[in-house]
Image: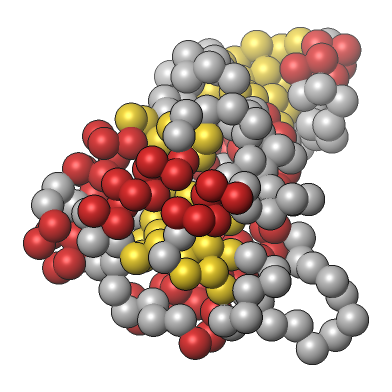
């Protein structure tokens, strides 16, 4: 997906929430012809108050726009979510070494997560944990499409997301700005509980099947793992993200 693409919100609650917020642009709302009910009425009223156009369309149009997902008779087309430049985003979060030390930001770096639903779920956890910004690769990364936005429960526009074609270089840049970079690796001996999160940190997550790419892992300051008592070999990447981010957020709460 390019930075200029539109995305789609699917379902009554995500669309209604988006209409009630100011930080997400909506180009139009599409309702199934003949749709009724209190939530449909609330969506119509919110769209009218906001000045968002409403179209009444056949079921086939909604199936097409939602790519076969359960749409509940409601689909909204959002304005583009603009990916940021890494330097721009970092400067807005904390522009200098001293500012980074004072604010102790928490960043998330995602290395090649290709499932949009996992991407969206990770973003939802990132927003909930108070993550200041997210950095993703320009290639081999899930798009920020309708499935991702729905999996994020509409939270994706609430956090700045930057893209880079060279994650190892970005991690070096973060360290130069005084961030300590923790990489999540299932085979790492150090458990995440023992890490020092009371400082500016960047948490790096790898792909669903392969984990961190070797150059990305090498660029981290330290690798940590999620200890598991049971016989499972690994966790879903979005579950691991939630554990890591909320552990990292504890000193900031």
Residue drawn at point x = 29 percent, y = 73 percent: 199
Is residue 128 at all visible to an observer of this figure? no
Image coordinates of residue 128 in percent, x first then y, are 49, 62
Residue drawn at point x = 81 percent, y = 22 percent: 67
Is residue 162 at all visible to an observer of this figure? yes
- Residue 201 lies left or right of residue 14; in this view the side is left
Residue drawn at point x = 53 percent, y = 17 percent: 2
- Compared with residue 201, is residue 37 higher up or lower down, i.e. above or below? above
Image coordinates of residue 160 in percent, x first then y, are 38, 41
Quarter of the image for residue 98 reads bottom left
Quarter of the image for residue 37 reads top right
- Compared with residue 19, is residue 67 higher up or lower down, i.e. above or below? above
Image coordinates of residue 169 in percent, x first then y, are 38, 41
Image coordinates of residue 40 in percent, x first then y, are 69, 33
Q: Between residues 129 and 35, which one lies in front from this camera angle?
A: 129
Q: Quadrant of the N terminus?
A: top right
- Residue 9 lies left or right of residue 95; in this view the side is right
Residue drawn at point x = 19 percent, y = 60 percent: 100
């Amino acid at each position: 997906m390019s930075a200029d693409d539109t995305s789609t919100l699917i379902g009554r609650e995500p669309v209604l929430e988006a209409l009630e917020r100011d930080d997400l642009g909506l180009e139009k709302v599409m309702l199934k012809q003949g749709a009724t009910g209190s939530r449909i009425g609330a969506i119509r009223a919110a769209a009218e108050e906001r000045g968002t156009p409403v179209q009444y369309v056949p079921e086939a149009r909604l199936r097409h726009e939602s790519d076969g997902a359960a749409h509940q008779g409601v689909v909204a087309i959002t304005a583009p979510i603009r990916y940021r430049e890494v330097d721009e985003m970092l400067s807005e979060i904390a522009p200098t070494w001293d500012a980074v030390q004072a604010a102790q930001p928490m960043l998330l770096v995602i290395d090649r997560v290709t499932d949009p639903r996992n991407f969206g779920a990770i973003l939802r956890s990132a927003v909930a944990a108070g993550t200041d910004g997210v950095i993703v690769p320009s290639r081999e990364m899930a798009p920020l499409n309708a499935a991702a936005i729905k999996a994020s429960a509409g939270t994706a526009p609430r956090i700045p997301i930057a893209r880079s074609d060279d994650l190892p270089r970005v991690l070096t840049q973060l360290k130069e700005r005084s961030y300590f970079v923790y990489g999540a690796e299932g085979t790492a001996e150090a458990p995440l509980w023992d890490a020092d999160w009371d400082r500016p940190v960047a948490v790096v997550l790898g792909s669903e099947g392969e984990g961190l790419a070797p150059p990305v892992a090498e660029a981290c300051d330290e690798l940590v793992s999620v200890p598991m008592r049971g016989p499972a070999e690994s966790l879903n990447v979005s579950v691991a993200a939630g554990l890591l981010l909320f552990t990292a957020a504890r000193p900031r709460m």
